[in-house]
């Protein structure tokens, strides 16, 4: 029995020893090396590990509890500011019209006296032969005086120089001044008719082609009238150009004039009619109607201008129809003037940009063409650079001092 137990114990010991050797040999077997890591050239830069950003840098200011958004907290409530109250534009007091052209004479003479100086130089020659008189004619024609007025001026000068004989510079200047004044005309009524005797308001319509500064001229004319103590209503009958009504209203607000306007692309005749109606109800002195710029070659547009005139005259006859011409267009302005005169009865001319051209003879030419006087001239971009036309001041600017 003991022999059997001993044999079992020995067997167990032997089996345990063998098991330990096997396990030990397995543990000592080295693991296979890991596969080599292939570099990823497109991989983004390594992100910070968890906790790297947990510590606030010492140089960064710490936020207060009020500045920290708590989880689940209510979104900040935006406080609405009260709407800004638009202030009424300040009413300007325009510069008085008396003497404006005198103030602007230097500006005018800078562009115009080349004509006068050229004529005086030619007339001062010792011998005034036919060639010299042809040069004098060319000088006048270049200044857009026109063929017929030029011939009249040259004939008058030749006759007077022949009678005078010897000629001093002062005498020549006096002769030229007198002959030019004859052409420009000093016995013409150049006042803008805005005060009819039998009714109120006076009605003035402003017409012209695109680009002549018609709306701006209407606004400046409102300033001229306000400066003379008149009250004004503006009619924005230029409904084709989107900015025209806004532009005219801005001009009116600056001097306290009310502007009547209609819908964009609306009927201009209706706007003009309403402007006169409101002017009557308000008891103002003058209604100024700004019409859309028309190409003198477009028959339909010109016919519509005639319609505006007829509709306005259902209230009362027009006191003035002022044609705005750009002095720099020269003889082309005469073609425009002729067509407008056929559609509406032009009563006066406004020459703009007269300070920007050396062709001051257009004053003479356009008056001859239409048989109506130049009443106002524009001599710059300023709000008060529209002045009544004064023949003496104009001629003095032409020939210089």
Image (cartoon, rainbow, N blue to C red):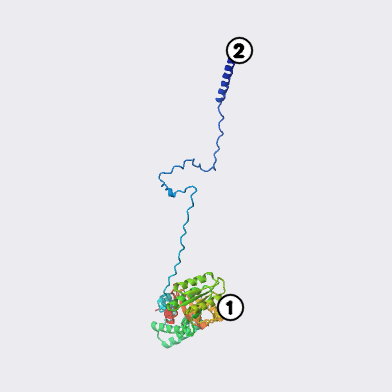
- Determine crowd level at label 1: few under 14, some 14-19, many 20+ residues with C-alpha closer than 10 A: few
Q: Earlier in the sequence, mark 2 or mark 1?
A: 2
Q: Position of residue 17 (x, y in %)?
A: 57, 19
Which quadrant of the view contains residue 302? bottom right
Q: CA distance from mark 2 to mark 1?
A: 143 Å
Task: Give residue 55's position: percent from left, percent from top.
Answer: 44, 42
**Helix, strand or loop status at disc 2:** helix
Q: Are marks 2 and 1 in contact (CB under 8 Å)?
A: no
Name the residue nearer the viewer: 84 or 365: 84
Residue 20 falls left or right of residue 67: right
Query: Can residue 108 be seen in this snapshot?
Result: yes
Q: Is residue 31 above or below residue 5?
A: below
Instruction: Identify the residue position indicated by label 2 in the image.
Output: 4
Label for residue 240? Answer: none
Label 1 sits on residue: 303
Counting from the top left corner in percent of width and height, residue 334 is at 53, 79
**Residue occupying image coordinates x 49% and y 72%:** 249
Q: Quadrant of the N terminus?
A: top right
Residue farthest toward the bottom in the current orientation of the protein: 163
Dot 1 falls on a residue whose secondary structure is helix
Quadrant containing the C terminus is bottom left
Q: Residues within 10 Å of mark 2 (few under 14, many from 20)?
A: few
Residue nearest the viewer, comparing 300 with 277: 277
Nearer the observer, disc 2 or disc 1? 2
> How many labels sit on residues?
2
One can see residue 361 in this view: no
Residue 24, picture quadrant: top right
Residue 280 place in picture, x, y as percent:
50, 79
Task: Tell me what residue is drawn at x 43 percent, y 48 percent.
Answer: 65
């Amino acid at each position: 029995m003991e022999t059997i137990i001993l044999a079992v114990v020995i067997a167990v010991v032997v089996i345990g020893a063998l098991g330990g050797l096997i396990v030990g040999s397995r543990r000592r077997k080295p693991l296979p090396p890991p596969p080599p890591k292939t570099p990823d050239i497109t991989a983004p830069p390594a992100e910070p590990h968890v906790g790297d950003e947990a510590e606030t840098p010492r140089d960064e200011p710490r936020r207060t509890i009020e500045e920290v958004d708590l989880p689940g907290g209510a979104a900040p409530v935006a406080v609405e500011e009260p709407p800004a109250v638009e202030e009424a534009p300040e009413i300007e007091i325009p510069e008085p019209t008396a003497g404006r052209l005198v103030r602007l004479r230097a500006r005018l003479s800078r562009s115009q006296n080349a004509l006068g100086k050229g004529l005086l130089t030619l007339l001062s020659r010792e011998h005034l032969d036919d060639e010299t008189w042809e040069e004098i004619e060319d000088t006048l024609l270049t200044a857009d005086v026109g063929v017929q007025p030029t011939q009249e001026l040259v004939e008058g000068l030749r006759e007077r120089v022949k009678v005078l004989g010897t000629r001093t510079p002062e005498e020549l200047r006096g002769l030229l001044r007198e002959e030019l004044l004859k052409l420009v005309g000093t016995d013409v009524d150049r006042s803008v008719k805005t005060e009819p005797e039998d009714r109120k308001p006076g009605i003035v319509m402003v017409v012209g082609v695109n680009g002549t500064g018609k709306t701006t001229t209407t606004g400046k004319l409102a300033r001229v009238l306000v400066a003379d103590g008149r009250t004004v209503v503006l009619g924005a009958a230029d409904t084709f150009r989107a900015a025209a009504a806004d532009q005219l209203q801005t001009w009116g607000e600056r001097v306290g004039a009310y502007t009547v306007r209609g819908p964009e692309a609306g009927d201009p005749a209706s706007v003009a009619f309403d402007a006169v109606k409101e002017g009557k109800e308000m008891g103002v002195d003058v209604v100024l109607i700004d019409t859309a710029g028309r190409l003198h070659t477009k028959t339909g547009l010109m016919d519509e201008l005639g319609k505006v005139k007829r509709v306005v005259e259902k209230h009362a006859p027009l006191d003035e129809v002022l044609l705005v011409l750009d002095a720099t267009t020269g003889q082309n302005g005469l073609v425009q003037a002729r067509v407008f005169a056929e559609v509406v009865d032009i009563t006066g001319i406004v020459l703009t940009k007269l300070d920007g051209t050396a062709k001051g003879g257009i004053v003479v030419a356009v008056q001859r063409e239409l048989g109506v006087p130049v009443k106002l001239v524009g001599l710059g971009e300023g709000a008060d650079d529209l002045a009544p036309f004064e023949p003496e001041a104009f001629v003095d600017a032409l020939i210089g001092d």
